[in-house]
Amino acid sequence: MSEEATGRALGPLSETVRELDEARRTLEGVEAATLEEMVADRLAREAARIAEKRIRAMFPFIEQKPSEAKEVMDAREAAVFLRLPYSSFREIAPMVPRHAVTPQRFVYVRSELLAWLLEQ
């Protein structure tokens, strides 16, 4: 069977084979160092993307707009935000969504406090 007849019989597969052959011929002219640089660049970009995705998943409250800079509050600010006396806030603090900065220090995110408040 001729190559043309085989190509017609295989349809889309023959088109893919032709494209791969064309790509192979194109890459024959590319130096190995250039190809290595392309692969290294692609790997670095992919690693950075994965790292950023994991960091965002670990710390969702750091995705703030500049206008929301005051969204992260300490305990006293959170008490004022909830319009509670600080002593009352300290009693409910373990039940409120918070993020540990140190073992004894926590920060509170405004949007999380609002969501928690609406659930109560």
Image (tube, grey):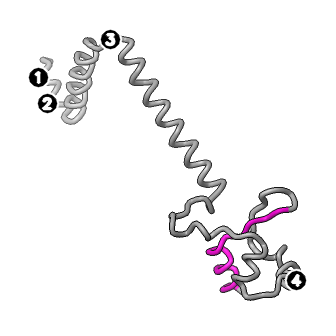
In the displayed structure, would residue 110 be above or below residue 42? below
| Residue at 82% in and 62% down | 105
Image location of residue 80, percent across then percent down: 73, 83
| Tag 1 secondary structure | helix
Discs 4/1, front: 4
- Asked if residue 111 is among those painted magenta in the image, a careful observer would answer yes
Q: Which residues are magenta?
A: 105-119
- Badge number at residue 87: 4
Say which residue label 2 marks: 8
Alpha carbons under labels 4 and 1: distance apart: 85 Å
Q: CA distance from mark 4 to mark 2?
A: 82 Å
Is 23 on the left or on the right of 45, as rendered? left
Please tell me how crowded label 3 is: few (under 14), some (14-19), or many (20+) other residues with Cα within 10 Å. few
- Give SS at disc 4: helix
Q: Are marks 1 and 3 in contact (CB under 8 Å)?
A: no
Q: Quadrant of residue 98?
A: bottom right
Say whether marks 1 and 2 touch (CB < 8 Å): yes
Residue plotted at (88% across, 83% down): 87
Residue 40 in the image: state x and y as whole percent: 46, 24
